[in-house]
Amino acid sequence: MSPPKICVVGSANLDLNTYTNRLPVPGETLHAHRFTMGYGGKGANQAVMAARLGADVVLVARVGNDLFGRDMLAHLRTEGIDTRRVTSTDGVPTGTAVITVDDAGRNTIAVTPGANGLLAPADVDAARSAIESARVLVCQQEVPIETNLAAMRLAVEAGVPVVFNPAPASTTIPAEAYRLSTVFCPNEHEAAVLTGKPVESPEEAEAAARELMARGAHNVVVTLGARGCVVVTARDVTALPAPAVEAVDTTGAGDAFIGSLAFFLARGDDLMTAAQRANRIAAISVQSPGTQTSFPRAADLPADLVE
């Protein structure tokens, strides 16, 4: 069977990771005990996760015409990702994410968009064939929303399912984005921002999902970190617990979930099965430090997870 095709429209960042005993409070300076640099951006992360599971992935993105951008392109190619639609952009830096991780694996992230902010509908139009031939399109909110909408419209017109990850959180998502989403997938924080209500339990996640579906989303998956996720469709509501693990670093776990979800949907799994498997892979990812460095490859996973 040929690899499932996935198109990801999204961001590509260089990650600057600092590890501390605890997260600093505003105005506080802490000594860190480790620093690393890595590859990130929600778009690139989700593309890498899907590619490591065996998908044929095209990434539509922008990087700066700089050292970081060239390094990113080389890295993506080593991951087997088609980078012909990743544009090197003069006069603007590659996006960066400054990440602080504490000893409990919790993190804070500040993102500077850089070239990501210049990804435009024209870039999407240039990637039309990749979108229309994909089994799944994946979008997030680290690029301009009009660019996402252009990609989502193309996908829907071609009958391609859309997975939309509304991250980072925003209260200004256009109504059209909900209607174009086959699977609308926020985490608990994003769901709370979107609905204006707390989302801390499966019951609250279901209520939030119902509200998001009322806005037009066809299906909603709310991820709850260590508590798993809640899948809500027009017919069913299912809370899927996550495996109990000791978290080392939760950075990128949501992207591991989204990339895995897209892969399993693209290969033909139903939404419930895809979410169950994505749950397990996200739980594996938090047991190692870093973002993409924590993402497992298909060969390293239990046979029942990827068979």
Image (cartoon, rainbow, N blue to C red):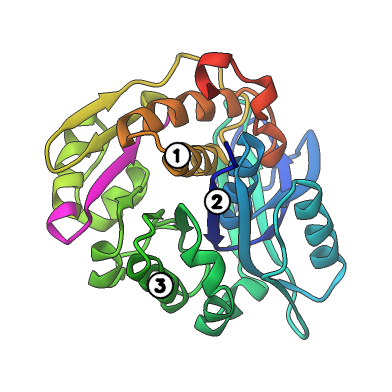
Q: Toward the viewer: 245 or 179? A: 179
Residue indicated by mark 3: 154
- Residue at 68%, 21% in the rendered image: 300
Q: Amino acid at mark 2?
A: Lys
Residue 37 magenta: no
- Residue at 40%, 72% in the rendered image: 154
Above or below, 237 against 240 in this view is below
Q: Toward the viewer: 11 or 111? A: 11
Give the image quarter of residue 179.
bottom left
Position of the N terminus by quadrant: top right
The picture places residue 3, in percent across and down from the top left corner, at 59, 42
Tell which circle, 1 or 3, labels the residue nearer the N-terminal end: 3
Residue indicated by mark 1: 261
- Residue at 65%, 46% in the rendered image: 48
Q: Amino acid at mark 1?
A: Leu
| Position of residue 68 in the picture relative to residue 237 (left or right) | right
Above or below, 10 against 278 in this view is below
Give the image quarter of residue 50.
top right
What secondary structure is found at the residue carrying circle 3? Answer: helix
What secondary structure is found at the residue carrying circle 1? Answer: helix
Q: Toward the viewer: 141 or 238? A: 238
Q: Which residues are magenta?
A: 213-225
Residue indicated by mark 2: 5
Number of the front mark, 1 or 2: 2
As measured in the structure, the alpha-carbon distance from the residue carrying label 2 to the one carrying label 3 is 16 Å
- Residue at 58%, 77% in the rendered image: 119
Tell which circle, 1 or 2, labels the residue nearer the N-terminal end: 2
| Position of residue 104 in the picture relative to residue 208 (left or right) | right
Q: Toward the viewer: 76 or 94? A: 76
As measured in the structure, the alpha-carbon distance from the residue carrying label 1 to the one carrying label 2 is 13 Å
